[in-house]
Image (cartoon, rainbow, N blue to C red):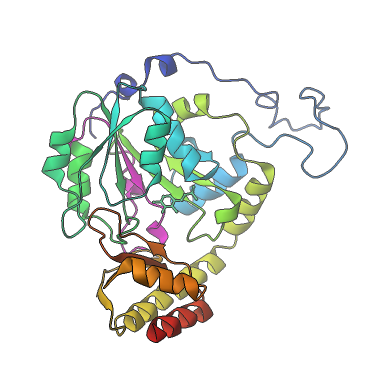
């Protein structure tokens, strides 16, 4: 196991912070029926008149079964966005610390850094969309608190080479966040199994993509018990609402259905990739380990506008580093993919 003192990476104000003690924290497991007149709730039933479980225990128990990670190594948030924001607030001192990102990648790392007044050091991926390990390690200084690795990466769709990730986990002096939003579409193994080898490893996942629940906003952070205990102190007490917890639990108990849908999406991805490759103005289709495909076209701005005119919205990534003239296509239903291909053929 790697030796690293996580406490040294925390912000000073976070080290000794006391969590808000919510009304319901202490008695939720009581076996007798208790009278709850402690939280100024409305006593009349609406199904959601009570505050939700601040620890989302049922959802975590189910996730623990599925993922093989202890519930004490999880923190749930209002989407990955909240989880990532909590990491900035725990580790990054505004106007002093920095984080490292590897563009082209997910835009929220930079947005959250700007919001928290944290400098972003950007080290571009190489021409195969892989991390330049030496350059990343050279870019870090004493104030580099977090390195964001998105694998499979958005928008490039590839997973990073496992040896490169391992080397970064071993040698980066701060926290390494591996964003696995697309892991359920990937052939690569999740880094969850290495959580206990690297105390500086944080894995984030989400129910927004493979689980089909973008609308409920549920993001998951997996880390050491110590890191989770710190995040628990600073998260808003009731950050995951009751409706979200209920829906998440329901979906996590229908894993067969989720897996079937993922299989279908992977088949459709293969089909879509083949069909896209016969379109004359599509120059390159990058291999995908996710539920979308990145393709280089002759003129991304022109093709993007033409598609909009036909009522099809894709993602134009042409302004991103290394993504000149690239469009990103999400794998849709059979019908949606058919409309896309038909329309592309007509342009
Ligand atoms: C879609 C996506 C997420 C999901 O964010 P949520 O807030 O959980 O919906 C996270 N990371 C990446 C890279 C994504 O593309």
Residue in the foreground of this view, choosing between 325 and 93: 325
Q: Position of residue 337 (x, y in %)?
A: 46, 78
Q: What residue appears at the point 51 percent right and 55 percent down from the top-left corner?
A: 208
- Region in magenta: 171-196
Q: What residue appears at the point 51 percent right and 77 percent down from the top-left corner?
A: 336
* Image height of 330 relative to 151, above or below: below
Q: What residue appears at the point 34 percent right and 80 percent down from the top-left corner?
A: 276
Q: Position of residue 9 (x, y in %)?
A: 31, 23
Q: Position of residue 49 (x, y in %)?
A: 79, 38
* Image height of 224 relative to 263, above or below: above
Q: Quadrant of the N terminus?
A: top left
Residue in the foreground of this view, choosing between 192 and 306: 306
Q: In the current view of this chain or complex, which residue is farthest to the right?
A: 44
In this rendering, does residue 5 appear at all? yes
* Image height of 28 relative to 343, above or below: above
In this rendering, position of residue 122 left or right of residue 191 = left
């Amino acid at each position: 196991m790697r030796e690293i003192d996580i406490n040294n990476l925390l912000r000073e104000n976070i080290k000794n912070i006391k969590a808000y003690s919510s009304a319901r924290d202490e008695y939720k497991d009581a076996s007798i029926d208790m009278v709850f007149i402690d939280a100024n709730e409305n006593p009349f039933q609406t199904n959601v008149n009570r505050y939700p479980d601040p620890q989302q225990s049922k959802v975590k128990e189910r996730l623990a079964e599925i993922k093989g990670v202890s519930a004490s190594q999880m923190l749930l948030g209002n989407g990955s966005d909240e989880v990532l924001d909590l990491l900035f607030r725990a580790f990054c001192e505004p106007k002093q610390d920095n984080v490292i990102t590897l563009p082209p990648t997910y835009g929220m790392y930079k947005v959250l850094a700007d919001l928290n007044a944290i400098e972003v050091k950007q080290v571009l991926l190489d021409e195969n969309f892989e991390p330049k390990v030496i350059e990343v390690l050279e870019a870090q200084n004493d104030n580099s608190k977090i390195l964001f690795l998105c694998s499979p990466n958005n928008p490039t769709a590839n997973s990073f080479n496992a040896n490169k990730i391992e080397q970064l986990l071993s040698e980066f002096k701060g926290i390494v966040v591996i964003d696995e939003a697309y892991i359920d579409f990937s052939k690569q193994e999740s880094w969850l199994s290495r959580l206990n080898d690297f105390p500086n490893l944080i894995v984030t996942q989400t129910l927004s993509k493979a689980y089909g629940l973008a609308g409920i906003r549920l993001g998951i952070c997996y880390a050491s018990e110590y890191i989770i205990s710190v995040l628990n102190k600073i998260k808003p007490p009731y950050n995951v609402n009751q409706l979200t917890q209920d829906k998440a639990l329901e979906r996590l108990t229908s894993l067969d259905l989720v897996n079937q849908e993922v299989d279908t999406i992977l088949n459709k991805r293969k089909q879509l990739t083949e069909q896209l490759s016969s379109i004359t103005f599509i120059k390159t289709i990058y291999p995908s380990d996710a539920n979308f495909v990145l393709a280089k076209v002759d003129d991304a701005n022109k093709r993007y506008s033409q598609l909009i005119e036909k009522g099809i919205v894709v993602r134009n990534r042409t302004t991103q580093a290394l993504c000149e003239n690239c469009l990103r296509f999400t794998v849709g239903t059979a019908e949606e993919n058919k409309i896309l291909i038909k329309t592309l053929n007509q342009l």
